[in-house]
Image: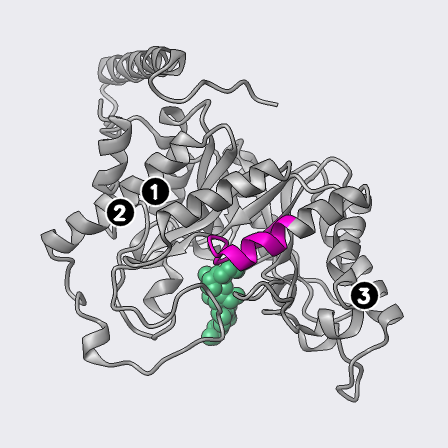
Amino acid sequence: MRARTPAAGGRGKGIKMQHMKTCRKKITLALLAASAFGCAFSAPREVPLKDALRGRFLVGAALNEAQVSGPDRRAAELAMREFNTVVAENCMKAASIHPEENRYNFGPADAFVEFGRKGRMKIIGHTLIWHSQLPEWFCVDSEGRNVSAQTLKKRMRDHIRTVMGRYRGAVKGWDVVNEAIEWDGSWRKSKFYEILGEEFLYLAFRYAREADPSAELYYNDYGMDGKAKRERVVEIIKNLKSRGLRIDAVGMQSHMGMGHPDIGEFEKSIEAFAAAGVKVMITEWDMSVLPFVASGAEISTNAAYREELNPYAESLPAEMSGKWNARMADFFRLFLKHSDKITRVTAWGVSDGDSWLNNWPVRGRTDYPLLFDRNLERKPFLNEVLGAKR
Ligand code: G3I
């Protein structure tokens, strides 16, 4: 368990300032060395986020295939510099990694894991059991009928064992089950639930524990600020523990807008999950500035494009940028306040142009939801809260 600095303002502030001085000294020495050898070395203007947040929580982003093994070198360099944790945005989902019952597609996931290893980052696997991005074959037979409980259990176990087994020791934590609970606290009527009932979730955690006893195991969902979902997830945590099953943390995806979630309700959920005996992770953080169409992250949601839904197609007006940064700063301060409970903050993409929100729930919009803008510049709220300028 990593040593934790107390909340800002206590001894932690002294540690943080000392740490920042050390970082600055390192960068200064590097600059002197580079200038002595005439290297063109342009040090970033800010202390990397991972250094500014050391001792508080890990910080990172979801990465796509273009970043880990393709053309998007600038985003890859930013990730290496700023982050100490990464998660696979898509390449480890069942539809991608296990497209047919007897065929796996490990190439993109291997590249993602190699990227994380090179950067000496905490690598997160997303996601083993999810109703979405599920290959056709997983829960039905060749006639399209639901398979038996026994068959589904075998398929789940084989999938989890094969995927986790391949990355044992490299992937440090897994979203074992994603989005199993509805807004009203009821169980999502997925194929997994139809065939196995609530048991599917507990079986998934059992199979994951068997597959890699060293890996951390998480339950991940959106809308976790909601009272009904919060209470159901607390019940799930307690049930897992009462069955002697491992759960290390819950992932609060944290897909936000300018009007949701309520920060007070969000804080109640952080405290409720921690009180249930698990850590909390902010796993898919983004905040849309665009006109509200749908909250949460139900990927199947979509709405027709209308000009009025895409008001900032060319740029974000300063006034709106100010409001967005202020709201992000409020949540970031909340995360720092609870850094004894929160062990990771992950943004759902590296920079604004990468965000799924440019195409959800309306395709073809321009959103500004992440920690870095389209020029890969850090959003102002981060330095405002961290004071991480050199
Ligand atoms: O890779 C194929 C490409 O070959 C094909 O030409 C193209 C045709 O549309 O599709 C590409 O796959 C797309 C994939 O993203 C990679 O870009 C899928 O259609 C598209 O559905 C998929 O969307 C992802 C979505 O999950 C569904 O898996 C988003 O990028 C991703 O940001 C989003 O992330 C989810 C989390 O996993 C769970 N929480 C909610 C979050 C947002 O929905």
Q: Position of residue 71 (x, y in %)?
A: 39, 54
Q: Position of residue 355 (x, y in %)?
A: 36, 59
Residue, disc 1:
331
Q: Position of residue 282 (x, y in %)?
A: 47, 44
Q: Measuring 48% from the left and 49% from the top, which residue is drawn there? A: 68
Whichever of labels 3 and 1 marks the residue nearer the N terminus, that label is: 3
Q: Measuring 27% from the left and 62% from the top, which residue is drawn there? A: 367
How many marks overall? 3
- Between residues 4 and 144, which one lies in front from this camera angle? 4
Quadrant in which the N terminus appears: top right
In space, the residues marked 3 and 1 are separated at their CA atoms by 40 Å
Q: Measuring 46% from the left and 53% from the top, which residue is drawn there? A: 225
Residue, disc 3:
155
Residue 327's tag is: 2
Q: Amino acid at mark 1?
A: Phe
Q: Which residues are magenta?
A: 219-234
Whichever of labels 2 and 3 marks the residue nearer the N terminus, that label is: 3
Other residues around mark 3 within 10 Å, as few (<14) / some (14–19) / many (≥20):
some
- Between residues 85 and 69, which one lies in front from this camera angle? 85
Image-quadrant location for residue 257: bottom left
